Image (cartoon, grey):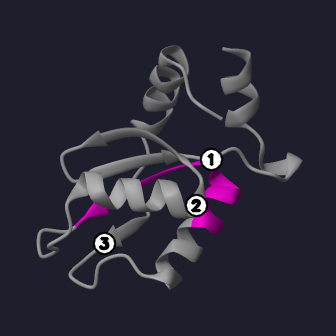
Amino acid sequence: MELRGKQKRFLRSQAHHLQPIFQIGKGGVNDAMIKQIDEALEKRELIKISLLQNTDEITEEVAEVLQDAINCEIVQIIGRVIVLFKPSSKEKYQKLSKEVRSI
């Protein structure tokens, strides 16, 4: 699902109030973290991930790796914070994805 401009703007407004639930440190991104992020996206559809000061990772590269591995959409990258969106496959968790489709 490729997001259009209005859809991304809506998701950015929804993500503004969220706190990052994952932090990527000097260990970088590993398979276990990718699996946890995928599970969190399944339940929440929209999450923030922050990169800590001590990591050597580049924010854009981490976002690309996560996008390829999880098949999610990058909504926004601000500094060291990444906002990701992936529509949930389970109907009971589909709150944002229904609104995004209607935009």
Mark seen at residue 63: none
Q: Which residue is mark 1?
A: 86
Q: Which residue is mark 3?
A: 24
Q: Earlier in the sequence, mark 3 or mark 2?
A: 3
x%, y% of residue 94? 77, 42
- Residue kind at label 1, given as amino acid type: Lys
**Closer to the camera in the image, 44 or 69:** 69
Alpha carbon of mark 3 to alpha carbon of mark 2: how far?
A: 16 Å
Q: Which residues are magenta?
A: 38-51
Secondary structure beneath label 2: helix
Q: Earlier in the sequence, mark 1 or mark 2?
A: 2
Quarter placement of the N terminus: top right
Would residue 20 be seen by someone viewing this image from the given angle? no
Alpha carbon of mark 1 to alpha carbon of mark 2: how far?
A: 9 Å
Quarter placement of the C terminus: top right
77 sits left or right of 87 in the view? left
Mark seen at residue 70: 2
Residue 28 against residue 89 in the figure, above or below: below
x%, y% of residue 58? 19, 60
Residue at 74%, 38% in the rendered image: 95
Secondary structure beneath label 3: strand
Labels 1 & 2 near each other (Cβ < 8 A): yes
**Label 2 environment density (alpha carbons within 10 Å; few <14, some 14–19, many ≥20):** some
Mark closer to the observer (1, 2)? 2
74 sits left or right of 41 in the view? left
Secondary structure beneath label 1: loop
Residue at 58%, 75% in the rendered image: 35
Residue at 14%, 73% in the rendered image: 56
